Amino acid sequence: AMSQQQLEERVSEIKAELGDDLFIPAHHYQKDEVVQFADAIGDSLELANICKDSTAKYIAFCGVHFMAETADMLTNDEQIVLLPDMRAGCSMADMANINQVERCDDLLQSTYGIDCLPLTYVNSTAHIKAFVGKKGGSCLTSGNAHKVVKHALEQNKVILFLPDQHLGRNTAYDLGVPLEAMAIYDPISETLEFEGEVQDIRIVLWKGHCSVHEKFTIENIKNVRQQHPGMRIIVHPECTFDVVQASDDSGSTRKILEVITSAPAGTKWAIGTEMNLVNRIIKDNPDKEIISLNPFMCACLTMNRIDLPHLVWCLNNIVEHRFDNQIVVDKETTTHALRALNQMLSLQ
Ligand code: CIZ
Ligand code: SF4
């Protein structure tokens, strides 16, 4: 096996060899050993924008599968998007497959008379984005969730929010939708749960979640309040409703970064989001006291599958024109999904 140093040298060598033909975008949740070679770092909205504008022939996408699919759909046919480890999925995206979503749509129409307007978090498969595009809905990210949901609420249709119940609930609640007007659809039992009357439902939340952000608890918040008086708590909106409500602030990756970076020296922060990012924020802000909201930290295991050996494998594949790890979304799916993606990009 190659040493860490040999691996790093190999990446630098291939980057020099391919020049502008190669572009390496990396998500904020990626390991430092990968991020050091990134041409761009961002959250999923920023990376979508960046890939759309890229003219590179090869895009070695350091993130998870749905992000690489999105990059493939937003680039042209000649550009090749590769994922350095094909097992780098997203457990949240896996919680909604297209058959389940179509069954849910049928049930809403046939049993409840609801013709929903679907919205999907970009953390979803290309097929779900295509379903959403076909029905006139939009994709969204945590960075523009408020704008997209507000726009949808103004159309006076019942929203079907896929696949993260927490982002859906937190966003709709912020926009004035009461909890009683939210129903939840369980794709396993294929049932809709709600408290009031059917005609009062404004949003149907898909019962999915992020296994990383769900690990932050009210108990963690109590401990921080007790042990670190004066410390401010900021969390990602993929955290549960109770955790978001008990925190001082919440927001997308970009917002968390902006808040912490612009905070005065000496301030104290507990952050509820992915571990690689929290550790990087701690390192980049030595003038502040920063901890993870959960002392045991929460890593995204699938993001972590992309490591230096996988990056080298991917780059070697490019040099040798072996595209086993290319991510391709078929034309038909892309056409429909792009409507939902472009709707998202127009509401930033
Ligand atoms: O949890 C994720 O996958 C996030 C926050 C994605 C993103 O960048 O919006
Ligand atoms: Fe998916 Fe959560 Fe990992 Fe993001 S942090 S990629 S939502 S499992």
Image: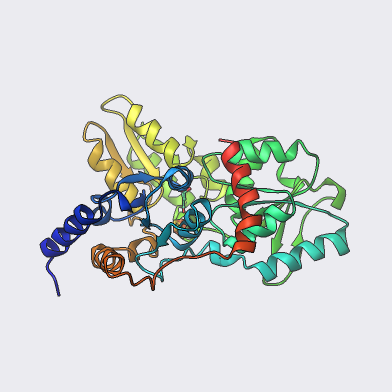
Q: Is residue 88 left or right of residue 9?
A: right
What number of labels is visible?
0
Residue 156 placement: quadrant: top right
Q: Depth check: give the residue in front, 94 or 327.
A: 327
Q: Position of residue 302 (x, y in %)?
A: 40, 65
Most distant residue in the top direction: 264
Instruction: Choose top left, top right, bottom left or bottom right for residue 287.
Output: top left
> Residue 289 or 70: which is nearer the viewer?
70
Viewer can see residue 342: yes
Image coordinates of residue 246 in percent, x first then y, are: 51, 41
x%, y% of residue 261? Answer: 33, 31
Where is the C terminus found, in terms of image quarters?
A: top right
Check the picture and name the quadrant holding the N terminus.
bottom left
In-front residue for pair 194/274: 274
* Identity of the residue drawn at 41% across and 71% down: 87
At horizontal 77% and vertical 55% (from top left) the residue drawn is: 194
Q: Is residue 170 visible?
A: no
